[in-house]
Amino acid sequence: MNKHGTVTGLQQVDHLCPTGLHWEVSPWEHSRPNIKAEMHEWTSSLLPDKYEVSLNDTYLKISAKILTDVPALLAWAPKYPSPFTSLPTLIYTTGPWTKDNLVTAVEFFFQRNAYHPFAQCSHPQKHSDPVPLTDILPNKVGATIADRRMLNYCPHQACAGLDPDSFRSERKEVNNMDFLDKSKIFSNGTIGLSETIRNPIKTFREFSRYVGSMANRKASGDDKMPADLFKKAPEAFRKRACILINIILAGHSLVKKPWDRSLIPQFRFNQTKQHTLCM
């Protein structure tokens, strides 16, 4: 579709999606005389119209014909241990996905991008990189469309199963960001969060950086003067304010009488639209 084209429905998706499980087969395992009989007996509980089983000299692969049948295969594998010593690994296929697999492939793409960057499973080791899956629930009485639900699969060998918790449960947490400070990624032209002004400011440029880092519509001091006063003021006003602040930071007092403390500088526009500094 382009600027002057027509809108057409999505017909095909080319994207890596999980389709089944893969077991490595060693040469001595493949040389057993009854290996094919053992394999058929092991996979006899899988419906042949939903899954394809293939065996060669190096591996055994079980693939689902419909992507929504993958969760059932992942739940079946731990209940029926394989006759091979290797552990199963998840296999992916690019497609193209059409018809019944079209919506599932689109769901996989968007759910994979929706995961928290530091999403972890419920295992004590906190494995990352979850795999989203789509499952179809049994039809309710009187319902014409089956309900779909998203599942989370942890491909790590210590788990290798569907995780009962949501991988997005810690979406508000933030991992350790010390590596950013060590690499000094944001050190150029920025001010640290814990940095404060304790000595007279050397240059007006440094003063402008401090003013620019102040939050808008916030009065951070006891005088209740918002930062917008300094941000929107002309340069001449900010330079005079810098001189005044440096005098205070140097330890000199400008207050000679007690009532002088109530004088608050204000910056405003008069009717001629000229800048005016009032006390």
Image (spheres, rainbow, N blue to C red):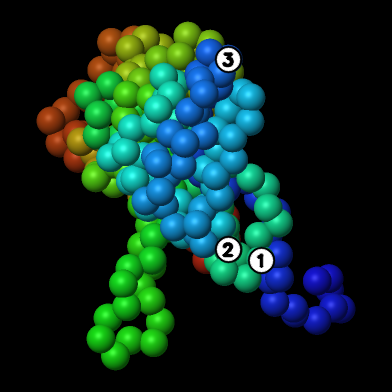
**Would you place residue 249 above or below residue 258 in this image?**
above
The mark nearer the N terminus, 1 or 3, is 3
Q: What residue type is labelled 2?
A: Asn
Residue 261 visible in the snapshot? yes
The residue nearer to you, when weighing 188 against 173, is: 173
Q: Quadrant of the N terminus?
A: bottom right
- Closer mark to the observer between disc 2 and disc 3: 3
Question: How dense is the environment of label 2, judged by Cα within 10 Å: few (below 14), some, or many (20 and up)?
Answer: some
Q: Which residue is drawn at 29% across and 46% down?
A: 166
What separation in Å lies between label 1 and label 3 (alpha carbons)? 37 Å
What separation in Å lies between label 2 and label 3 (alpha carbons)? 36 Å
Q: In this view, does 259 lie to the left or right of 186?
A: left
Identify the secondary structure beneath mark 3: helix
Q: Are marks 1 and 3 in contact (CB under 8 Å)?
A: no
Q: Which residue is drawn at 32% across and 19% down?
A: 194
Residue marked by disc 3:
27
Q: Which residue is drawn at 48% across and 28% down?
A: 34
The residue nearer to you, when weighing 188 against 198, is: 188
Q: Are marks 2 and 1 in contact (CB under 8 Å)?
A: yes
What separation in Å lies between label 2 and label 1 (alpha carbons)? 5 Å
The residue nearer to you, when weighing 97 against 37, is: 37
- Residue 216's x, y, as percent? 40, 46
- Residue 109's x, y, as percent? 56, 52
- Residue 106's x, y, as percent? 57, 60
The residue nearer to you, when weighing 66 against 255, is: 66
Q: In this view, does 84 lie to the left or right of 173?
A: right
Q: In which quarter of the image is the C terminus?
A: top left
Question: How dense is the environment of label 1, judged by Cα within 10 Å: few (below 14), some, or many (20 and up)?
Answer: some
Q: Residue furthest front?
A: 33
Residue marked by disc 1:
98
Q: What residue type is labelled 3?
A: Pro
Residue marked by disc 2:
101
